Amino acid sequence: MTTIPMQATDKPTRLADGRIITFYSFKGGTGRSMALANLAWMLAMNNKQVLVIDWDLEAPGVHRYFHPFIDDKELQSTRGLMDFVEDLAARAAASPQPLPPEEADVSSYVVSLDRTGWNWAEFGDRAGIDLIVAGQQNAGYSTKLNSFDWTSFYTKLGGRRFLFHMASQLKSIYDYILIDSRTGVSDTSGICTVELPDTVVVCFTLNEQSIRGAANVAESIIAQRSAPSEPGEKAEGAANEEGGRFKIYPIPTRIEQSENTKKQIGLALVQKTFSRYLGDVSKDDLRKYWGDLQMPYVPIYAFEEVPAVFGDLYYDQLSICAFIGRLAKVLTRNESISLEALQEERRLEALGWFQRPSETPQDPAQLAEEAFQRLSEDLRHQSIQVLLRLVQFSANGSSPRPFYREELQRGLSAATDALVRARILQSVEGGQAVQLADPSLLRTWPRYADCIQNDMEFLQWRQSINSAALSWRRRNQSESTLLHGEELEEAKGYLRTRAGELNTDERDYLSESVERDEQRRTLDELSRANEEALKLQLAHLKSELSSTNITARKSKWYLSTTMILAVALVLAAAIAALFYYYQRNQEAQQKAAIAQQVAAAQQAAAAQQALVAQLRSELAEANSLAYKSSAPTPNAATPATSAASAASGKTLTGSTSGSNAKALKCQILPTTETWNPGGQILVKVNDMSVGSFTVGAKGSTGLSFACRPGDNSIEMAFAGSSPSCKCSITAGKTLNFTPSFYMTNGTSATCSLSPLPSILTPAPAH
């Protein structure tokens, strides 16, 4: 290998910031450029600022691994390294004085890689890749390359000083400068492998020529780096010397897995030849190095320049991507390098940018299925949900339709973007909506057609709900558009099982329908309960009033007032119900009206109960007055007893007292015993209501009423239901009686009378 001799006086101080790594191969076809490009991608996606220089001037091509990020993909107008050194040489030759090193400013020849849809900031504040191409690839490039005198530029025009200044400038800016060196032995390859780099990666295949040629180059690099350029100059240091900065890493590439025996023989030769260049390392470390750093041969990457960091899954340990990850850790001296930060949908998107389109027309359904299969499992499920939104059902069948992104249910943004990147969908209306890129997919893509057919019932129902929800919004959430009856019951079923497939508007619409229906049911039930209670208690009042011959004017006036109040209560309840149905134009007013009606109905019920209790009390008093005013003169009949058979149960005891001249006073005494069932007991004397008392957990309330001397018929009955008991007593001058009422198991009743000592107490005169 020949090279231009180094001149110590021209060599600037090296900076410690960035590192220059040269990728070299003795022969072509080793995958050198591919390894370099993948390393650049991996470093950049781990927050490193990377510069790639294409120094393979005779056969430039590393830019192909970045072409989606370059506007001038064929480099017809992009100036590069060859243009830089030619311009610099021309200025130096024309200048009467040596040009200062600062003239070697290469910044205007740097191309930054970027494109729409890719954000370097996702990977960190330093992440990015810049590129210096070999040169402008026009008709004059080969002439310029062949006519340029590198020896004259390097030795006479100060080229060595310029290139070292360029290297220093770049190392102060970038974390890593990766140089793709040309193959073979030449002046320019010597610059790349001896003069500029901190590290050289020597790539070779397992054939004899490639191994021996790479070993000779490595030996030449070591010899030139170790020898001083001038007498008395200290050598820079042997390769991989302990504490030294310069490193050589031999890397076997394109390892074929099918011929294991030949592979093992070739690797044994590689280890024997190159292990000494790795420095003083242990046997275990050597085994790990040679085990980890074998670049596999993957046939698919022979067809087009697709970076393996996008084509492989990062966790596939047998892939090129996994090898690049291990190489990156070695070259960066064990920095934390990983591709886990690259999300799966982003990887698939970038992969699509690099893949070469087919010149032969392909079936859209087949392309859609292939793109769908490349999605992750989670994205596939979500993508189906997106696709099912793009179907319009009508009497004539189904047809494709656009759908606004904001109307999709939550969680489908990533899937929608992935489908757009896969060209299954396309954005319309300025990106606000999406639709099928090819409408024929609705019928020709089997997966899509099957999903529609298998879920037709739900999809048609959801479409109707979507339209209803839209109408509900447009009509200011009018109650008239809400669901009810059988439609609402069907919607409740889907809400329980498939709420996740409804968007926000649809769920809001259905929730409002359910809430309003429940409120309506509650008010209706309350109204019916109040109406039934009113009817029942009015019936009791009517029965009691009709059986009582009230002669006092006060009683008749009170009865008339009672009926008026009862009718007023019914009318109030009816007005409340009507108010509920007609006084809800806005949602706040509607809910307030409902609350008011419920409160009004409850107040009406409470007022009705209080009124009934008051009516019963005053009615008992009215009956007592009427009975006393019409009672006959008592006689001296002999007391007698009439009773049904005794029965076990709760009892109420009472007494009668009086004289022959006046109405007797009967009293049913309170008791503390518990009655089952409890309730209100109505009492009649001689078929005329005289009052009531209550029994229950706290005993009875007791009752006083008038009783005429002689035979009397007394009847007790639970209000509104059975059981009841009826017996007769004889009230006389010499004996009083204590009526005892027995209730058996809450279902039957018997009565008995027990004599008491004669205590005659006339009832008060009225």
Image (spheres, grey):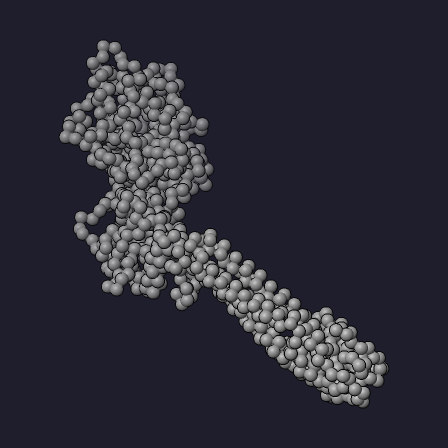
Relative image position of residue 390 (x, y in whole percent): 30, 55
Q: Residue at x 44, y 36 (%)?
A: 334
Q: Answer with left or right where residue 648 lies relative to residue 453.
A: right
**Up-down relation of residue 339 to residue 709 (above or below):** above
Q: Answer with left or right where residue 644 lies relative to residue 581.
A: right
**Up-down relation of residue 473 to residue 20 (above or below):** below
| Quadrant of the image containing the N terminus | top left
Relative image position of residue 201 (x, y in whole percent): 34, 34
Residue 637 is drawn in which quadrant? bottom right
**Up-down relation of residue 84 to residue 122 (above or below):** above
- Residue 367 is at least partly visible in this image: yes
Q: Nearer the viewer, residue 635 or 253?
A: 635
Outermost residue, top direction?
A: 96
Q: Residue at x 74, y 87 (%)?
A: 711
- Residue 692 is at least partly visible in this image: no
Q: Nearer the viewer, residue 10 or 590?
A: 590
Relative image position of residue 674 (x, y in whole percent): 72, 73
| Quadrant of the image containing the C terminus | bottom right
Q: Residue at x 45, y 57 (%)?
A: 583
Q: Residue at x 31, y 53 (%)?
A: 372
**Up-down relation of residue 276 to residue 223 (above or below):** below
Residue 196 is drawn in which quadrant? top left
Outermost residue, front direction?
A: 553
Relative image position of residue 186 (x, y in whole percent): 24, 28
